[in-house]
Amino acid sequence: MVKHSNLFSRRAVLGAGLALAFLAVQSPAQAADLLQEAKKRGVLRIAMEGTYPPFNYKDPKTGQLTGYDVDVAKLVANRLGLRPEFVATEWAAILAGLAAGKYDVIVSQVGITPKREQAFDFSRPYTYSQPQLIVRKNDRATYTNLAELKGKRLGVGQGSVFEQQAKAVPGIEVKSYPAAPENLQDLAFGRIDAALNDSLMVAYLLKNSQLPIKAGAKVGAVERMGIPFRKGSPQFKAAVDKILLDAANDGTLKALSLKWFGIDATRAP
């Protein structure tokens, strides 16, 4: 069974935090480009949740942050000539903290959405994924889209984008969970008919669970994950975009994705 308690948070709807971020947009632009600021101090301050394996979490043996996002963050910082300084931050407050200048960037599977782009600039995407169903191994039903779950019970992460997507389909009985273990247990015991999560997370959940469940169909649009930072730093954006593009072209990003997921999730399918 997966023991981590915060496995839905990458897709969480950051209501209050995002509202605070929007307020920050109204403040005057920073005088110096973030690239100049970071170079001056020699450090890139990187926020991440730190409790979201396999993307970013503390290694139980060493206590050090590890994961796909950590490797990507180190890659960016190193190629900028900066020392990475990680700031573990609760997901609910992570965007508000960025708006307040508590750190320079977030590398924690933040989805690039029009609403968030109103408040922040984003790097080019470094990860692509899709919503995916999880079903019981012995379930003969084949759901190919959310509409086919009308009249069924679907488990989702509380406050997640998946919750929004499910509730937008009339007829689905949506049950929200604070964490993945309870969701998957209810699925295994037949209390719900399917669960909905991110495709990359589904692979991890199934790998680390002994429950009689399996991956179902991918049922949504491809989503892009990028690195957000405060607006007004075109030099910083250009530098980070070049690093990510170069890393995609030279195979570095692909290698990191294969290391953590077993697939190349760094290019749009």
Image (spheres, grey):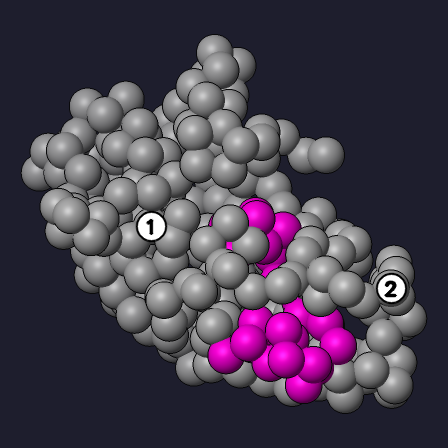
Judge depth for marks 1 and 2 and give the one in front: 2
Is residue 101 in view? no
Residue 143, which numbered label? none
Asked if the magenta segment contains residue 191, the reply would be yes
Total marks drawn?
2
| Left or right: residue 77 compared with residue 145 | left
The secondary element bearing badge 2 is classed as loop
| Numbered circle sitting on residue 140 | 2
Q: Closest to the observer: 235 or 169? A: 169
Q: Is residue 93 above or below residue 221?
A: below
Neighbour class for label 2 at 10 Å: few (<14), some, many (≥20)? few
- Judging by the rendered image, the residue that carries numbered circle 1 is 56
Q: Residue furthest top?
A: 250
| First reached walking from the N terminus: tag 1 or tag 2 | 1
Front-lying residue, 61 or 107: 61
- Quote the CA–CA distance across marks 1 and 2: 35 Å
Residue 153 visible in rendering: yes
Point 14% across, 33% down: residue: 83
Q: In this rendering, would 163 be left or right of 20?
A: right
Which residue is rendered at x = 71% and y = 48% of the image? 222
In the rendering, at what x and y percent does residue 234 appear?
40, 37
Q: Residues within 10 Å of mark 1 (few under 14, many from 20)?
A: many
- Compared with 191, 38 (above or below) is above
Q: If the image is split into quadrants, where does the N terminus sit?
A: bottom left
Q: Amino acid at mark 2?
A: Arg
Residue 204 percent across, percent down from the top left: 50, 50
**Identity, as a three-letter code, of the amino acid under mark 1:** Asn
